[in-house]
Image (cartoon, rainbow, N blue to C red):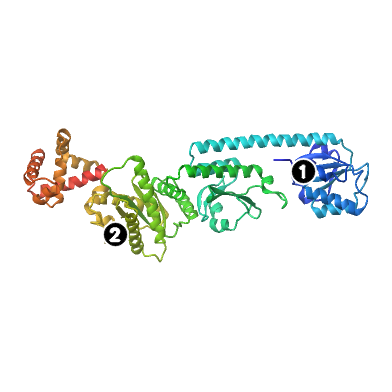
């Protein structure tokens, strides 16, 4: 935030003195913290570093060793530069020993060929310094307020990253410890170029400390984490750096460092506040799956972001998988969220256990979706069977409800990923009402042929003709149950599911046979049908399956 030596030399009040750099030209980007006028040869003892020294040289040592010692002491204390005015001690040239020592120590040495009022120089430079300090305070306050608001609002990592990118005017990437991209903002640059080969590029950047600048790549990097547990890094690409190796990155890009560290603190805080929610990886996977299903993301965006997460989709066979849990009762909202989060993490664990490559995330309040990416040598059935087996074992160990595993048809392009996910969703909805694993292939998972009529009805559930059919077949019975608080529709369902075996149905309904028979007679009277006729029972059974599909 301080003016550099080069900036000071460009001031009108300084240019009047015809300044000429005679040594240390490559170090003119050093920041000037203050201007000090002194003729003392031992002035280094009262300096703190960052000063620009103005002198006429009238009291400087005459011999070579004394000049070298003078320069060495200034360089060791961290002086920004030395300005010598001609006219009192020196007139046309500085002593060669002085110039040589300054060049050796990398100390900018400037001569003024015309006399100047030093007080005018100090006033002008100090005005710049004070203004820089005020600007730094304003910038610090802006950053503090912005990220305080984001923290209070519980902003998602994507929002934090976007804010950093806007304030820095440069691309920003949030990655995990495996160097997979969790969120990014390109700041208007090409995303393909930004993320190309990200993992290998990122692994090569290892700055010292929690925050550091990598001069080779221009990256400014800070660790993200809290309580001694880091879980990622925040990277500002193309952050401004100093041309001098001996100037700390914090001095060269103080505002960017402050910005990046404040954003990292916000991310870490929000991670602590939402630690009972899904992980960042699951959030990112969920966003991609949602983007595929809703067309919120383009095909190229999906492929690029998934690749940055370590899930390549292009040139692979993609299979949609949807998981739903069977449960007897509907849990409270918070309990349901916790169950879904745990179930999602269990599914991700099964994917890792079988070394599969897949996006894994919640699709809604009840379902978990996977987009499995298979290579040309991967056996699809073996991969899915292995995943299903692993998932059921992990679910059993975690004492979670038994899952319904539904699989869509494999596709060969990212643009068709939505189709396999939608098909898997439809199969899962249709299979949810089956007996556990009764129709699944090899008792492992369901596909469209496995759900048969139920699957077809689910596909047609939004068709008005199917809804009309349900009302025509079952409407009177549904109305009777609603009016009398009875459960005749359930009695009919049990009767048909038991293959029209009245004795078995009565046992399944936990009723005596006379009581159950009486309820069946009521069903016949309300609907005006004969339950001994096969066609009537077939129509009613289809209507019940269609009712399930419509209600889903």
Label 2 residue SS:
loop
Q: Is residue 169 left or right of residue 302?
A: right
Earlier-in-chain disc, 2 versus 1:
1
Of badges 2 and 1, nearer the viewer stands 1
Residue that mark 2 sits on: 444
Q: Position of residue 318 (x, y in %)?
A: 39, 57
Q: Quadrant of the N terminus?
A: top right
Q: Secondary structure at mark 1?
A: loop
Q: Quadrant of the C terminus?
A: top left
Q: Position of residue 269 (x, y in %)?
A: 51, 42
Give the percent coordinates (x, y) of residue 187.
57, 45
Residue at point 48% right, 51% down?
305
Residue 10 shows in the view: no
Left-right relation of 113 to 159 = right
The answer to whether residue 257 of the structure is visible from this angle is yes
Whether residue 357 is situated above or below residue 34 in the rendered picture: below
- Residue 48, which numbered label? 1
Residue 334 vs residue 202: left or right?
Answer: left
Which image quadrant is residue 520 in? top left
**Marks 2/1: CA–CA distance:** 73 Å
């Amino acid at each position: 935030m301080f003016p550099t030596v080069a900036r000071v030399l460009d001031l009108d009040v300084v240019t009047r003195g015809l300044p000429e750099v005679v040594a240390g030209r490559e170090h003119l980007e050093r920041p000037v913290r203050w201007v000090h006028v002194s003729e003392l040869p031992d002035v280094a003892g009262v300096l703190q570093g960052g000063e620009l020294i103005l002198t006429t040289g009238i009291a400087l040592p005459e011999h070579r060793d004394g000049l070298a010692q003078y320069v060495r002491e200034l360089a060791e204390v961290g002086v920004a530069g030395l300005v010598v005015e001609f006219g009192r001690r020196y007139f046309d040239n500085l002593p060669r020993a002085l110039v040589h020592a300054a060049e050796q120590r990398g100390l900018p040495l400037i001569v003024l060929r015309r006399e100047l009022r030093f007080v005018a120089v100090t006033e002008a430079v100090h005005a710049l310094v004070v203004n820089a300090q005020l600007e730094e305070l304003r910038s610090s306050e802006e950053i503090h307020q912005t990220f305080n608001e984001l923290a209070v609002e519980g902003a998602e990592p994507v929002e934090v990253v976007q804010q950093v990118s806007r304030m820095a005017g440069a691309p920003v990437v949030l990655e995990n410890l495996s160097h997979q991209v969790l969120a990014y903002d390109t700041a208007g640059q090409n995303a393909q170029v930004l993320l190309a080969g990200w993992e290998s590029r990122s692994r090569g950047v290892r700055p010292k400390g929690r925050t550091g600048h990598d001069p080779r790549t221009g990256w400014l990097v800070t660790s993200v984490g809290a309580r001694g547990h880091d879980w990622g890094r925040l990277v500002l690409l193309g952050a401004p750096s100093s041309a001098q190796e001996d100037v700390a990155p914090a001095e060269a890009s103080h505002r960017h460092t402050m910005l990046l560290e404040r954003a990292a603190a916000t991310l870490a805080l929000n991670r602590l506040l939402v630690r009972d929610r899904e992980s960042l990886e699951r959030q990112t996977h969920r966003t991609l799956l949602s983007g595929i299903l809703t067309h919120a993301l383009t095909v190229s965006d999906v492929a690029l972001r998934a690749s940055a997460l370590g899930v390549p989709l292009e040139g692979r066979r993609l299979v949609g998988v949807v998981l739903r849990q069977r449960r007897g009762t509907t849990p409270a909202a918070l309990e349901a969220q916790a169950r879904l989060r745990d179930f999602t993490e269990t599914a991700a664990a099964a994917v890792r256990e079988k070394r599969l490559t897949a996006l894994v995330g919640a699709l809604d309040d009840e379902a978990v979706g996977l987009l499995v990416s298979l290579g040309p040598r991967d056996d699809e059935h073996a991969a899915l069977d292995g995943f299903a087996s692993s998932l059921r074992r992990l679910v059993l160990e975690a004492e979670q409800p038994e899952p319904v595993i539904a699989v869509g048809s494999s596709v060969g392009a990212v643009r068709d990923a939505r189709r396999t996910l939608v098909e898997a969703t439809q199969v899962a909805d249709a299979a949810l009402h089956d007996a556990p694993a009764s129709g699944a292939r090899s008792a492992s998972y369901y596909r469209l042929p496995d759900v048969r009529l139920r699957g077809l009805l689910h596909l047609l559930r939004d068709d008005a003709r199917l809804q009309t059919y349900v009302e025509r077949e079952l409407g009177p019975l549904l109305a009777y149950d609603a009016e009398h608080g009875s459960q005749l529709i359930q009695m009919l369902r049990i009767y048909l599911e038991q293959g029209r075996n009245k004795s078995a149905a009565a046992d399944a309904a936990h009723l005596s046979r006379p009581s159950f028979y009486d309820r069946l007679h009521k069903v016949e009277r309300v609907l005006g049908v004969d339950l001994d006729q096969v066609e009537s029972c077939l129509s009613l059974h289809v209507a019940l399956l269609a009712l399930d599909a419509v209600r889903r």
